[in-house]
């Protein structure tokens, strides 16, 4: 259904018009907001309405006038709306997220953008913390403090949960639904499949010949605190872990297209739809159509990308950050597979008592908690951990001035908590990274705390540094927290050959020796 996409774009156009701030645009902005609300609450698909009844059918929808109907037609025919693209170029602001913060409207956001370049919540928070906002006309010291409180409030209301909480729960639900015997296929979709660091809700997709029975089992499963909606195509439950879960049942024939659609992200989908239109096709959650024929009927998700002349795009990359363009040129980064990591670069395990080490053949064990700590390497032999004599230094950037500390250090150094120095663009981080490039330092990823975030790592990826993934847990299993660290590198476009723990134990030992 393209309704949500169009509704979202109309809401954004309204904010953009208000931000532009001319008197006459207020009237127009209201018309877009009204249309957006009307479209969000519609049951029927706008595209179907248009195909059946043309523009007249669109005009008969309450809240939709001629100007707006033209925009809907433009979107159906091209996958984008020029007016929106033009406005967005002038104000590339994430209005949808920022408008959730009390005390901010389109006009104020436009001022913040023009004065400080603020386009999203993270940038706003950073500007407030650095006391940059209080100097802007219309803001003061008081409103700065209030805004910070309002940001926290907005985040509490949206209540996203970390991936390390959502993923195991999604996996448990998938396994449970499979065990009922009422499902032909069950898969995790949405941001959980993309391994996003925080999750708004869990999305599960299933194909079933017994949809009612499967939905019964779903709403009565363990971990459910209340039922929000129940139908034979979609149900939503609240989970005790503090989020909600959508289960959608789709036909076996459209499962591949539905996986593509419900994995998202929304922005990725919108771009892909536009690409399909450009090739004379139509893409939605039911299929990829040429005329009335679904070209990918009964085919897996991969077929959608293949039919659009794209290399297969791994879910973690689907954020509209250039992945579609790269896939068209068959130049996607060669990212690491989940099974390709061979060791744990930061373990908290007790080496005298080996537990679950599935998939891991060596660990580096933390020897203390100073700012610069030595990690000793162990391999496993017949259930015992054996010290190899190799070691690596890890520098906790949050505990000391990392840049000055580095001058006195020698040997290969891993930096952890690098994000505690500031945003990727800050001088402290940039200085450090400049040094990294020259001295072969390594950025350590904390798989348990899921940091630094993939956004952080993504904006630094152009520099020449290596990456190491540590579990930061006492269970260095590839089935445990390591998965989330691996996910960060995939989302950040970090190539596999930059991750040092894809080396086997011997190769890593020679790497460390040669870098001394
Ligand atoms: P979340 O839940 O906020 O962490 O993020 P997602 O990506 O899981 O978003 P969600 O749960 O709202 O929807 C799941 C997927 O369904 C989303 O990634 C793409 C697809 N989808 C949902 N709403 C829209 C929409 O308005 N337009 C398009 N094109 N796709 C949508
Ligand atoms: Ca979701
Ligand atoms: Ca959802």
Image (tube, helix red, strand yellow):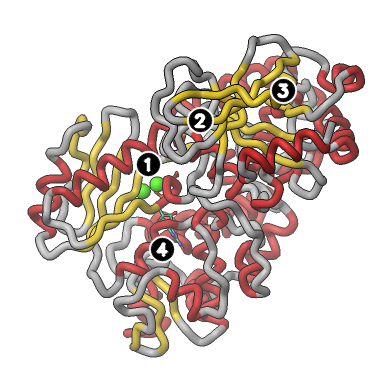
Disc 3 from disc 4: Cα separation: 41 Å
Residue at 46% across, 59% down: 7
Quarter occupied by residue 120: top right
Q: Kindly check if marks 2 and 3 are in contact, taking CB atoms under 8 A apart as contact.
A: no
Residue 166 location (% of width, % of height): 38, 36
Q: Kindly check if marks 2 and 1 are in contact, taking CB atoms under 8 A apart as contact.
A: no
Q: Assign a secondary structure to mark 3.
A: strand
349 w.r.t. 318: above or below: above
Q: Assign a secondary structure to mark 4.
A: helix
Disc 2 from disc 1: Cα separation: 39 Å
User: Label 4: which residue?
Assistant: 261
Label 4 residue near ligand 1, CB within 8 Å: yes
Disc 2 from disc 3: Cα separation: 22 Å
User: Label 2: which residue?
Assistant: 380
Residue at 20% across, 59% down: 233
457 w.r.t. 299: above or below: above
Residue at 27% across, 28% down: 240
User: Label 1: which residue?
Assistant: 201
Quarter occupied by residue 347: top right
For marks 2 and 1 on the same chain, the one whose residue lies earlier in the sequence: 1
Which callout, 1 or 3, points to the residue nearer the camera?
3
User: Label 3: which residue?
Assistant: 394
Residue 234 location (% of width, % of height): 23, 54
Q: Kindly check if marks 4 and 1 are in contact, taking CB atoms under 8 A apart as contact.
A: no
For marks 4 and 1 on the same chain, the one whose residue lies earlier in the sequence: 1
Q: Residues within 10 Å of mark 4 (few under 14, many from 20)?
A: many
Q: Assign a secondary structure to mark 1.
A: loop
């Amino acid at each position: 259904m393209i309704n949500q996409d169009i509704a979202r774009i109309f809401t954004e156009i309204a904010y953009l018009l208000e931000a532009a701030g001319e008197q006459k645009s207020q009237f127009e902005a209201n018309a877009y907001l009204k249309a957006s609300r009307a479209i969000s609450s519609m049951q029927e698909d706008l595209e179907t309405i248009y195909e059946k009844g043309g523009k007249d059918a669109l005009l008969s929808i309450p809240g939709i006038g001629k100007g707006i109907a033209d925009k809907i037609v433009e979107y159906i025919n091209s996958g984008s709306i020029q007016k929106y693209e033009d406005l967005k170029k002038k104000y590339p602001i994430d209005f949808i997220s920022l408008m959730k913060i009390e005390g901010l409207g389109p006009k104020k956001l436009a001022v913040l953008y023009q004065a400080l370049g603020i386009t999203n919540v993270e940038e706003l928070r950073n500007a407030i913390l650095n006391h940059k906002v209080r100097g802007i006309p219309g803001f003061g010291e008081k409103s700065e403090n209030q805004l910070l409180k309002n940001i926290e409030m907005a985040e509490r209301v949206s209540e996203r949960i970390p991936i390390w909480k959502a993923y195991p729960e999604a996996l448990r639900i998938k396994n449970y639904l499979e065990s009922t015997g009422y499902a032909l296929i069950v898969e995790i979709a949405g941001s959980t499949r993309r391994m996003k660091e925080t999750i708004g809700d869990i999305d599960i997709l299933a194909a079933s010949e017994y949809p009612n029975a499967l939905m019964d089992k779903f709403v009565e499963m363990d971990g459910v605190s209340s039922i929000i909606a129940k139908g034979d195509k979609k149900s939503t439950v609240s989970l005790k872990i503090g989020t909600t879960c959508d289960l959608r049942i789709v036909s076996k024939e459209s499962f591949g297209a539905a996986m593509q659609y419900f994995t998202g992200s929304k922005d990725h989908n919108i771009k892909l739809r536009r690409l399909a239109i450009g090739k004379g096709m139509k893409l939605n959650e039911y299929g990829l159509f040429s005329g009335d024929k679904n070209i990918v009927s009964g085919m897996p998700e991969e077929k959608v990308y293949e039919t659009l002349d794209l290399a297969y795009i791994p879910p973690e990359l689907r954020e509209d950050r250039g992945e579609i363009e790269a896939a068209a040129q068959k130049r996607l980064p060669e990212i690491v597979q989940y099974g390709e990591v061979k060791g744990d670069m930061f373990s908290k395990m007790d080496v005298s008592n080996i537990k679950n080490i599935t998939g891991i053949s060596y660990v580096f064990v933390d020897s203390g908690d100073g700012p610069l700590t030595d990690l000793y390497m162990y391999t496993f032999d017949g259930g015992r951990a054996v010290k190899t004599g190799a070691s690596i230094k890890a520098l906790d950037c949050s505990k000391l001035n990392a840049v000055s500390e580095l001058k006195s250090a020698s040997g290969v150094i891993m930096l952890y908590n690098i994000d505690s120095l500031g945003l990727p663009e800050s001088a402290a981080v940039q200085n450090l990274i400049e040094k990294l490039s020259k001295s072969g330092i390594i950025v350590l990823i904390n798989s348990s705390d899921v940091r630094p975030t993939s956004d952080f790592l993504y904006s630094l990826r152009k520099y020449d540094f290596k990456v190491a993934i540590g579990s930061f847990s006492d269970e260095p299993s590839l089935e445990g927290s390591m998965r989330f660290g691996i996910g960060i590198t995939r989302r950040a476009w970090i190539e596999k050959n930059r991750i040092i723990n894809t080396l086997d134990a011997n190769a890593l030992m020679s790497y460390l020796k040669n870098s001394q």
